């Protein structure tokens, strides 16, 4: 399994989850867990996905996610689970 963490933060708008999940499905990336909330108009989501069977390598996926981030007007960050864990260690 190639677990990857995707975080999304920005102003809420219609279609954020749909756009990201469509992209993941098109690239054979399975959503393992998802949690999202909206606080005073700000959208926040964290997803744990399995990118083991992804059609593209991580660098390409990250580049394309960045384009979706700009398209949606939110900040999307995609990191391998081990890097995420190191960066968020207390």
Image: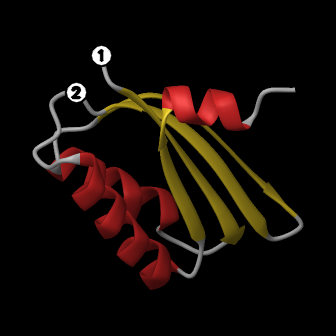
Q: Is residue 50 above or below residue 54?
A: above
**Residue situated in front as seen by the camera: 58 or 5:** 58
Quadrant where the C terminus sits is top right
- Residue name at image x 69 percent, y 71 percent: 10
Quadrant where the N terminus sits is top left
- Residue name at image x 47 percent, y 68 percent: 15
Provide the residue designation for mark 2: 52
Whether residue 34 is visible to the viewer of this picture, yes or no, is no
Q: Position of residue 53 (x, y in %)?
A: 15, 30
Q: Residues within 10 Å of mark 1 (few under 14, many from 20)?
A: few
Provide the residue designation for mark 1: 1
C-alpha gap between disc 2 and disc 1: 6 Å
Whether residue 55 is visible to the viewer of this picture, yes or no, is yes
Q: Position of residue 87 (x, y in %)?
A: 70, 38
Q: Position of residue 27 (x, y in %)?
A: 17, 48
Q: Give the structural element (helix, strand or loop) at label 1.
A: loop
Colour scheme of this structure image?
secondary structure
């Amino acid at each position: 399994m190639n677990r990857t963490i995707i975080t999304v933060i920005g102003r809420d708008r219609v279609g954020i989850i749909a756009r990201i999940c469509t992209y993941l499905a098109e690239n054979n990336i399975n959503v393992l867990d998802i949690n999202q909330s909206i606080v005073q108009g700000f959208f926040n989501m964290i997803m744990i996905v399995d990118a083991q069977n992804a059609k593209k390598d991580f660098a390409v996926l990250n580049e394309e996610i960045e384009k979706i981030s700009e398209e949606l007007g939110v900040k999307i960050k995609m990191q391998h689970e081990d890097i995420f864990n190191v960066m968020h260690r207390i």
